[in-house]
Amino acid sequence: MPHIQLLSPRLANQIAAGEVVERPASVVKELVENALDASASRVDIEVEQGGVKLIRVRDDGSGIDESDLPLALSRHATSKILTLDDLEAVGTLGFRGEALASISSVSRLSLTSRTEHQEAAARVEVEGRDMDARISPAAHPVGTTVEVRDLFFNTPARRKFMRTEKTEFNHVEECIRRQALSRFDAGFTLRHNQRVVQSLRPAESAVDKERRIGSLCGQQFVDNAVIIDAEATGLRLWGWVALPTFSRSQSDLQYFFVNGRVIRDKLVGHAVRQAYRDVLYNNRHPAFVLYLDVDPATVDVNVHPTKHEVRFRDGRLVHDFIFRTLHRALADVRPDDQLRGAAAQSFGREPAMPSAGSPAPALAGYGAQPSPVSEQASAQGGFGHSAPLPRQQEWKASDQMGFYQSLNEGGGVAPAPGGYTPQPMSITPPQDSADEPPLGYAIAQLHGVYILAQSRAGMIVVDMHAAHERITYERMKRALVEQDLKSQPLLVPLSLAVSQKEAALAETHGEELQQLGLQIERIGPETLAVRQMPALLRGADTEQLVRDVLADLIEHGQSDRVEAVTHELLGTMACHGSVRANRQLTIPEMNSLLRDMEATERSGQCNHGRPTWTLVTLSELDKLFLRGR
């Protein structure tokens, strides 16, 4: 066994560089974060050959004093923390003091800086071979410029892992995109091979922030996003979340910031996926730009050298806050919110952003099944008078099969009260009505599948089965919540062989499992007995369900597995009980469905995440027929 020896500073820095400096984008990230920590209002980034030949970052921040320049390139030297208390409440992006030392060990680095108290600037230069800092006078305004040349020139093995120039620059561009999203108060300029790629001015107002979001994430994201801003228990979550219809095939448009630091955290990802679970199509990913503001003392950022991971002191509180905020925001979106932007464009106005705080119509009582004849469609076929409608029998979980079978006898909507059956009729929708419903008025049915509605915004096409499916599903969910989840004892208790950790977890979380309708007892060091199951899930795979619940408790400290399986069953029931294709609906029935959609949560998507309606604006119709040309 060789004797233990201290590593040389150069070798120690190169080991650290293996964690911190993965590629040119990593260098750009560290240098831009240092600039932002120095209160820079303008950051200029210039790269050549994807960052391999040159990376230059210039800022107008506070600068570095000449006497501190040699120390700035030393390992574990920083001005951002001094004591353990500072480390436990880090408020800056950088704090380790490893970045500049690591970068200088694998490149030719020069740093020029000047503070407002200095008459002249100074430059320090270091090459990876000898690591000796050379200081000389220089000309420079207040601020700092860092030049990194010939990255990995002294570590050929690392350079072999570099990708093409285009790929490396794409990573650099993504890095700048994240930094620009995290700091609206700073301006950014990115140049590649002497060509300006990105130029962003500081964004102070809400309009400027939306403009920056549009330039970095695409205007279509802004047009299809909901603005949220919620605060509770010392936490604040704000930003933009895309509507479920604006989903992605991959998770390339997901940005989450904690106190201005971009992170990718499993806890956050789980909370977001859970919020979108009811409305997202299979294998699709949501898009969002979200900001979480918390007390720095309640989050540990000293988890990984890249600082992409954090650890929350109360992870469950953060998870629940994110989930409930997003879940409520998506549920509050109504057709009038989604139509606002399209209608504004149709009339030549600037589109308004839908907001989670927008007033929404009150939900229909879930204990009663509304009549298909809406308040706009009376028994005489008019749109302004309606008779009071009788309350139908309350939905019960025990009558689940009969519920959706009797809901639409014959595959259609139940007849109107009093034995009157509306007959097909032609109705001319009111013109320029100030109180026109968001989805307008039905005018026809297409192929027994789609409802055609007319509004001032244009033509609205509704998939009647998908829309009715969501309405029925939401009513069943609410009825189930109001009646609580009933448990049913198993005739023969199910014995499960588990690990000691899982057995101990089931024992300590007995009350929480009981709330889920599961009664689980520990009958041995590695054995569990399942004695009760939710009555609604009596046909489910009990063993797999329990194992999934325990896995969720281990991973996230809680489980929504029972709720997910229950909702999946309710979704199937709603699908089977909704109006079918080729069922001829009358105009009042179609209008009733439109009014129910306007009052139902998440009515823009069916239970499977598919859209329930779409709008063809007047301007789009004019383009089709070349009107006005």
Image (cartoon, grey):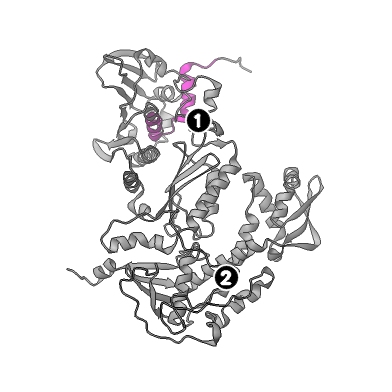
Mark 2 surroundings within 10 Å by alpha-carbon count, few (fewer than 14), some (14 through 19), many (20 or more): many
What residue is at 40 percent from the left and 69 percent from the top? 437
In the image, 511 versus 215, the foreground residue is 511
Please state if 139 lies on the left or on the right of 35 as rendered: left
What residue type is disc 2 on? Ala
- The circle on residue 305 is 1
- Against 460, residue 546 (above or below) is above
Q: Secondary structure at mark 2?
A: helix
Name which residue lies at 64% across and 48% down: 558
Residue 374 percent coordinates (x, y): 47, 75
List the residue tagged with mark 2: 574
Please give the range of residues in magenta. Answer: 6-33
Residue 439 spot, x, y in % from top left = 40, 69
In the rendering, at what x and y percent does residue 519 appear?
Answer: 76, 55
Outermost left residue: 629
At a point 34% along the width and 27% down the height, the residue shown is 150
State whether the magenta stretch is mostly helix, strand or loop: helix
The quarter of the image holding the C terminus is: bottom left
Tell me whether the residue at label 1 lies in contact with that at label 2, contact meaning CB atoms closer than 8 angstroms.
no
Answer yes or no: is residue 591 visible. yes
Look at the image and say whether residue 500 sits in the magenta stretch.
no
Q: Amino acid at mark 1?
A: Pro
Q: Nearer the viewer, residue 312 or 293?
A: 293
